[in-house]
Image: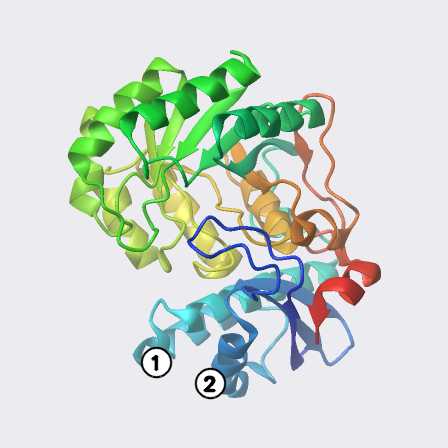
Amino acid sequence: MKIAEIRTIALSGATDDHGWPGGTDPNVQYNTLVEVVSDEGLVGLGSCYTTRALVEGALELLSPMLVGQSALEPLRVSETLRQSTFWLGRGGSVEHAISGLDIALLDLWGKALGQPVSKLLGGNYRDRIKPYASILFDDPPVLADKLHQQVERGFRAIKLGWRPFGRVSRQMDELLVRTARQAVGDDVELMVDAGGSEQFWPHGVHWARETAKMLADHGIVWFEEALAPDDVEGFRQLHEASPVLVATGEVLTRRQAFAPFIESRAVDIIQPDLTKCGGLSEGLRLAWMAADHGVLLVPHGWNTAVGVAADLALSAAMPVARWVEYQTGVPYVEQLVLPRFELDAEGHLLVPTGPGLGIELDPDALGKFARR
């Protein structure tokens, strides 16, 4: 079975607020789906966190190395793409495109073999996992209402991120976290994402250390992106002093970028986004590298339902996994595919058991959000 064609689908019209300045335009286009079509008509589905124009540009480079290759050797094919494009896209948007292609190749492989991707990654250590509802901070009264909604939906873990946390004052930060804890009680896990990958992040290690102490007072599980994304030494110093777990990694690509954080034990948790970092095959390598150093992998999931399905597959295939990110109220996550993701009675998501990723695009959603 050979790879015959690559198709792209741009998602727009319902883009959720991503927390960046000026990030409220629903028509901005950040997520691009890719379909890898075999010569036997099977279609694998992937997702890239980058614009369609950049994916199409990358495909001009990648397609000659992709079309005609075996559709049953996804790890070899995607790694060959990566190794062959170092001079033109080492870790940038070309890698984002490879990420979506890799996910699609794994999905296609699973469909061809009639097996779920989680089994093809090595086997299922679990059939469900706890998602954390991922939402943005807001003014305290609005924040409390948002949190109540997540608890009512059945979430038992919630992450709060970005503005106004870290942008106003220490007093505001403490008020936000105290409001959150009071709103959900002691039985719901809370995580905090400072959003240090925002442009021109002003805070350093001292701010991060003091903030981590405050978070510990309110029972926060982890402190995410407290520093600029590439500040390995800063994260190492924070990790040594922090009473809560330290997490980062959503903007990093390729295992080589994660290695310094893992090998120096600068963090407790790495958070690769499979639609950016290199796809499922790179995520698998990262997960085992992290496990060998006592670091946990929790996939970053601020993308699409295809990304969520990939996260579930990877998390099922790892001996130690505790959470996946789930962006709530977002059409590209909650309306894009069938079957819909649903929480069980204990607030967990089931790992799909169908062939490939175990999902299919919803034609109605495509009619609303997709531009082929």
At x 43%, y 49%, the residue is 272
N-term-proximal mark, 2 vs 1:
2
Residue at image mark 1: 88
At x 46%, y 57%, the residue is 22
Q: Is residue 263 left or right of residue 148?
A: left
The x and y percentages for residue 34 are: 63, 70
Along the line of sight, the residue nearer the viewer: 165 or 270:
165
Q: Is residue 337 left or right of residue 234?
A: right
Cβ atoms under marks 2 and 1 closer than 8 Å: yes
Q: Which mark is residue 141?
A: none
Q: Quadrant of the C terminus?
A: bottom right
Residue 243 visible in the snapshot: no
Q: Amino acid at mark 1?
A: Leu
The x and y percentages for residue 103 are: 58, 61
Is residue 21 depicted above or below 212 in this figure?
below
Is residue 177 depicted above or below 79 in this figure?
above
Along the line of sight, the residue nearer the viewer: 247 or 173:
173
Q: Amino acid at mark 2?
A: Leu
The x and y percentages for residue 279 are: 50, 59
Circle count? 2
How far apart are the alpha carbons under marks 2 and 1? Answer: 9 Å
Badge 1 marks a residue whose secondary structure is helix
The x and y percentages for residue 354 are: 76, 49
Furthest toward the right, the residue is 364
Look at the image and name its color scheme. rainbow
Q: Quadrant of the N terminus?
A: bottom right
At x 63%, y 23%, the residue is 148
Task: Rate crowding at label 2 as few (under 14), some (14 to 19) or many (20 or more) other CA atoms within 10 Å.
Answer: some
Furthest toward the top, the residue is 186
Residue at image mark 2: 61
Answer with the quarter of the image where residue 364 lies. bottom right
Task: Rate crowding at label 1 as few (under 14), some (14 to 19) or many (20 or more) other CA atoms within 10 Å.
Answer: few
